Amino acid sequence: MLINNEADIKSSEITSEQDYLNRRQFMKFSALATAGFVLKNNLLWAADDSEKYHRLNNVVTSRFSTSEEKNSWDDITTYNNFYEFGTAKDDPADNAHTLKPKPWKVEISGHCKKPGSYDVDDLIKQNQLEERIYRLRCVEAWSMVIPWVGIPLKSIIDRVEPTSKAKFIEMTTLYDPKQMPGQNSYVLQWPYVEGLRLDEASNPLTILAVGLYGRVLPNQNGAPIRLIVPWKYGFKSVKSIVSIKFVEKMPRNTWNIAAPHEYGFYANVNPGVDHPRWSQARERRLGEFFKRETLMFNGYGDQVAHMYKDLDLKKWF
Amino acid sequence: MRLIKIFIFFLSLFPTFYLVYGTFTDNLGANPIEKILHETGFWALIFLMITLSVTPLRKIKGLNKIINLRRMLGLFAFFYVVLHFLVYLGLDRLLDWDEIVKDITKRPYITVGFSAFLMLIPLAVTSTKGWMKKLGKRWQKLHRLIYVAGVLGVIHFWWLVKKDITDPLIFAIILTGLLGIRIYFALVKKKHLKV
């Protein structure tokens, strides 16, 4: 007969009476400790990291700049729609470090007299860099005020001399899933393509931006070079451009291909034409509690309205 | 069981603490209102799924007792739906009733989301023991509305996203599983009765 004299429970495993009485406090403590840990690691991200980006020299101000209060570096660089790095607003800031914006070539092709592969630095250096503080209105009904640094797109158009056949210009983002991991997903058709009518592209408001807050463009904002058309919804302003092509026919842009009844080619900011799923009458300026009335052409009507006087903006949304 | 219940109660409140803390320390990103709106909606769906998984999980030996958690979990789902709705009314639409009425009547994703919210109200009201007794067998019938609310909630999420349907798809798969398992058990039961 086997007599087991060993205690079933080791004394070290028995909770002391004191600990037993303190169990609620222990639970409260663990809950708080867990909470503290999670908050510290998820919420308190690094503040302004603009120092990491080198300053651009010899930038002049522009008469097209707004005097409205600018959004912070942090707002502009952590809240981005750039699906090439993920579809959440904070994905690009987390993931865009894989992009190598230097060296960078832009292929200029199509109906122009001087096609070729241009280095970004070459493309820029002949021009005076300007700071353009523009309103940016996203099709999702939020907006920001952003101090871009760039050059008028027209200066590049003039340089490569489009022929009479050139009616539109088609711009394309880099396609390289290694550098842009979001391109491994089929959420949009890659590469991202956008287009403008040639007169829109030549409008003095249209710029190619290479900087932000006087510094080089962070990757998540479309480094090294991106389009800015401030009277159109943000998705028109294609990022990380590798190709500019002069074409005869209206190109189909990526969001239009993805959802033709929701996103048009023109995409002019228009409070009178709603998105099928939400109103465009008002917008939330990031950092503000109350919403603002959305302005026709995002407030740039004086400079651009004349281009659309014969166009039915309800049909050509 | 009581300790577990208290623990789960505080755990369930954690997303709320996270959002309140984030609001006061300005740590919810560039668009805090959108963040709060999306997070409360997300947690409402999570709690709906958790509530719906209680019954299937009870089939596993030893887990029968988790039925004691179901009411609390269901009420947390309702709590996050209410928060989500209040944030939408007060912070997102700023109590602009014209716009809100237009949203609910004209925008399908809001119509279905709002319907799901309405359906959960009677369930929350009749969640007490008293109502359970009063309604008897009809209680269970009434509370099957949660299946419809779950489906509408997932559709609401699906229709609102711009393009990336990954998250709503995950919810749809989970929900299909949870409802499918019920259909399966119902069929098995029927068969047994016949035999």
Image: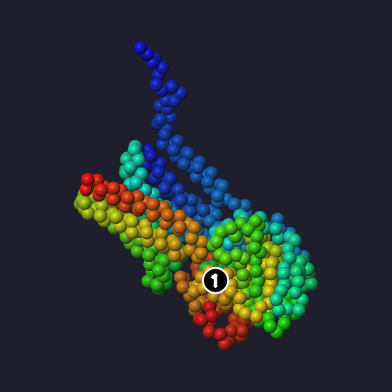
Q: Quadrant of residue A202?
A: bottom right
Residue B182 left/right relative to A93: left
Quadrant position of the N terminus of chain B in the picture? top left
Q: Position of residue B10 (x, y in %)?
A: 42, 45
- Circle 1 crowding by C-alpha within 10 Å: few under 14, some 14–19, many from 20: some
- Residue in the foreground of this view, choosing between A82 and A259: A259
Is B19 or B71 nearer to us in this picture?
B71
Horizontally, is A294 left or right of A20 in the view?
A: right
Which sits in the foreground, B189 or B173?
Answer: B189
Q: Is residue A219 visible?
A: yes
Q: In the image, residue B36 lies at what x, y percent?
A: 48, 58
Residue B40 seen in this snapshot: no
Is A134 rendered above or below residue B80?
below
Q: Residue at x 62, y 65 (%)?
A: A191
The residue that mark 1 highlights is A257
Q: Residue furthest bottom?
A: A310
Residue depicted at 41% across the width and 52% down the height = B174
Determine whether A153 is above or below A93 in the image. below
Q: Residue at x 70, y 58 (%)?
A: A100
Q: Is A244 left or right of B185, judged from the image as shown?
A: right
Label 1 element class: helix
Q: How many marks?
A: 1
Q: For residue A133, which quarter of the picture? A: bottom right
Chain to which mark 1 belongs: A
> Disc 1 marks which amino acid?
Ile
- Color style of the picture: rainbow
Q: Is residue B35 above or below residue B193?
A: below
**Quarter of the image containing the C terminus of chain B?**
top left
- Position of residue A266 measured from the top left corner of the image (x, y, whole percent): 57, 77
